[in-house]
Image (cartoon, rainbow, N blue to C red):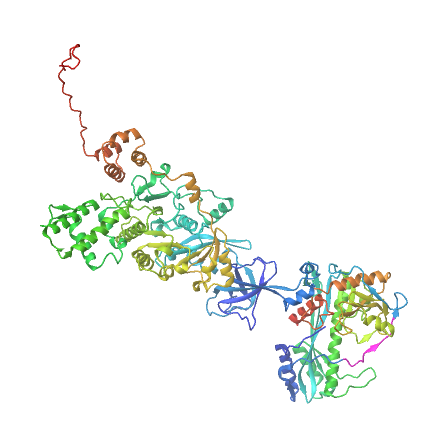
Amino acid sequence: MLVSNSGPDAASRAAVRLLMQRLPSLSPVEGGASVEPIAPTDPPILRSAQIVEGSAVRAVKVPGASGATTSGFGAFLDGAQKVQVVAHDRGMPIVIGTVSAAVRVRVDRRMITWGHQPPRVERAIYLPLRYLPTLTAADVSTVAAQSRWRIVDTSTADKNGEYPSQHPAFLLDRAIRAVDQQREELEDRLAEAWCARGEAPLFIDGGISRTTSVASSTCAIGVIKSHRTLYVQGEALGIVMSLRKGERSSVFRVAPRSRSSVLSWYLRLRAPDGHDAMWGLVRVEVAECDRLSERAEEISRWVLAETTPLSLPDGRWDKMAYGVRDCEEFLRAIS
Amino acid sequence: MSEALGRVVATERKPNTPHEFHFWTAIDSPVGIGTIVRVDGAQPMDGQIPHIYGIVVEGFSYTDLQSPMHDVLGHDGLPTMAGYASTERAEIRLYTAAVLRQIPEEPLQPVPMGQVFLAEEADVQVALRMDSYLREGANTGIPVGVYRAGGTDAVIYLDADFLLGPEAAHLNITGVSGLATKTSAVEFLLASLFKHFPRDKGSIAAVCFNVKGPDLCYLDKPGEVEKTDEVLYEKLGVEAKPFEGVEYFAPYTAKGLVLNTFRNNEALLDNVTPLTWGLREVLQFAEVLLNKDDVDAKADALIDFIKENVVDKEFRDPVLTKTHRVQSFADLDAWFRDVLQGMEKKDGESWRTHHVATIRKVRNRLSNISTRCAGLVTDSGAVSDLPFGSFTDRTVYVVDVANLEEDAQDLIFARIVSKLREHLERRDLGVKHLVVFVDELNKYAPGDGADTYVRKMLLDIAERGRYLGLVLFSAQQFRSQVHRRVVGNSGTALFGRMDADELSTPGYAVLSPATRTKLATLEKGQLMIRHPHFTQPIFVRFPRPAVMQGREGAERYPQASEISLEAAILRALRPLDPTITLPWVQEITALYSDEEVIRARNATLLARPDNVKAYFTAQFRKIIPAQAAPRPMAGSIKSAPENDPYGF
């Protein structure tokens, strides 16, 4: 996922002007700088998972993984988002969110955009309507119509019926989470479309368990770079943290309550010597399957093959496939 | 309409301007340095979609790689591993194009964003403003080559009004030696001129000075034309055949027996005319042969005196023993001798204000000319010259001076160009337009060095020739070393493959590095053209001339070596009368000196009479063969008696 930091464009400024006509106390933010993604509020956790390959987690050398290994991935999917606080009304943040997602297909070793589903770019204005009493429903409709952007209320009650705090930072966090959610929806729609066509294996930047159809598709492979949640505990944690380059963990099942269950394993892409324990460590997700060891080895070889060319200068280059970087660069260009 | 092959891009760092723009293409697009492209603007201006034509002058390629080190790291320092990478890095082909033309031309604005198309033949005509002189009613286009890029073959035309005047004139060619570019280009361009120069603009001829090698010596002989060149000839509308009208001129060798030219093979002599001048012709251009050290004011005054009062006049003076009529170098030497002897008798130091030392000096220098220019300058005064006044349309007159000394080359050049100029001023040369081709301009019109007569003449042609119809086609290896006013006045410039050192001189700074690199690697048959109508140089291909190449001609028609006098006479006269035989020549010339025989030959060649034998014979003074005196009858000797052994 790409977080872009560019300033407001002409369309954003036009949207702010529309709001200013209806909110006299609205104060535009100079430059309208993008907001960094919020620090995860969920604490890092260890979660147990069902081992499905053997009886305990162990390190497995991926056989046949070398520089000459050919990758079976035919495409890459990633999304991007941009969150800009463009104004505030007596402290209430007015946010414009831009989300985008694209599938980039590899043809003759070069990346091009998937022809069947064009890349998606969507924009929305995130307003805490509850705390902007002067803005009527008619005003909201007018702004939405004139800007042709969706208006998202960031001050709705949660599932417990409680309204969010009026604290501007809290409201901004809500807006950012809403943008996150919108981006994930875009990514999911593209992944579903890809899997529905049964095309070549798709390298998805992130997990695949959000939608059932993708989670069960043999052509969707998720590669997760962040490890706020580790699906190993105890001795198994030490084994995973000690994986050498080209080694994977045993396969385990990840079955979140609200999501589909998938098979997963850890894979070390680069030698961690001299780096932190997470250096070059990714977690791979695939759909449930038989002969899971063979599947894990094959997919691991593919993921390892994607470590060249390097995705530098991206700071996550130790874990990021070049195809994913290509997606991000593409989305940066179009959104 | 063809598909778009690129898109215009502009950034703050690399903005577009009214004269330059940038665009990117697919990796495999046929765009290269020198490709002409068309940009279709997106927004109409005054109801008209702007079209911008440009020529690619620079290209860039890069990937998203920030540091080469990243690539090394990515492949563990092993280049062979790079081939296994699943994905090629994103790569861009970014080109810079110089604007050739914008339509509409006003207001002149920076190039807008838009799609980029490969220029088709019609686009090329518009881009290079050729449409203005290819339209009906103008028709002054002279094909010079074919522009080729991405499947587009477009004929490039020069505007005759800007090549031969009066708008602009002159053409200059630069290129390294040995690649057959300069001479070949001129040969093809002359063929194209002769074919396409509009008849209603008058007649045209060319005088080519062959200053080195045999390249211009076989213009009337067919050469090998390859299939690829045949296609070019057809496209350019020029027939692949040798020149129909070619006349050659060359002086004799110092001995005066054979012509001093690569073309003195007997099989080629039918259109070779000797070039010989006498005292009158040379004295007019004494300045060419006598440098400033030779000719001070006093000597100059004496030479003027001789020109005004001595040459071709009955000259009497008390100091002289007889009346002189000076018509040749031999006559002049006799006159000098008489003057000096007369002065010695009178023990005088000056004669008619001229000091004896000055007279001796001028005698020495002038008499020396016939030695220095032997073969060209005759003692006898016989003149064989170019047909000034009767030049014919579409004819090439080649003056072969390749084997001559520098002095003789200078003299020939100076006199012929002066005569051409005189006749063109009087409009009686025989043709209205005349192209003069001179190679080795580095030597004849150098940027530095002494201000020679020849250089002054070349400057004069370059600056004023177009008003007369006298057009200079010049060539050299190093344009930077030629006088700026000569190359600067050349409206059209052609460039073949160039030397890297030459390209690094300031004169080429206007070209982009990529264009300079292309110039340094041009193939045979490729040229870069600058022409007044073209706002940027254009690359073209031209076919190899359909005439025999110098090397091939020299092998097929070996140069004649020095031969006997009789054989030389036979060789010279047989083209006029094939019945002449060697025994006949030997019989006629047996009693005469070499000088008399050569003079008779020269006179016959000049007159080209119907009855060659009679005319040649009539040139000799009558000599009655000496008859043997009758042997007087000796008286009988008294015989000795047989018995008288002592004869008493």
Q: Is residue A192 above or below residue B290?
A: below
Residue reaching furthest right? A55
Would you say B337 lies left or right of A76 here? left
**Quadrant where the N terminus of chain B is found in the figure:** bottom right
- Residue B52, position as x, y percentages in the image: 51, 64
- Residue B96, position as x, y percentages in the image: 53, 65
Relative to the observer, which residue lies in front, B395 or A334?
A: B395
Relative to the observer, which residue lies in front, B199 or A202?
A: A202
Q: Is residue B316 above or below residue A323?
A: above
Residue at 18% x, 32% y is B622
Would you say B26 lies left or right of B370 here? right
- Residue A7, position as x, y percentages in the image: 63, 78
Relative to the observer, which residue lies in front, A133 or B189?
A: B189
* Residue B283 showing in the rendered view: no
Residue reaching furthest top? B643
User: Is residue B544 inside the magenta stretch?
Assistant: no
Count of marks placed on residues: 0
* Quadrant in which residue A57 is drawn: bottom right
- Residue A282, position as x, y percentages in the image: 78, 69
Q: Which stretch is magenta?
A: A40-49
> In terms of secondary structure, what is the magenta stretch mainly?
loop
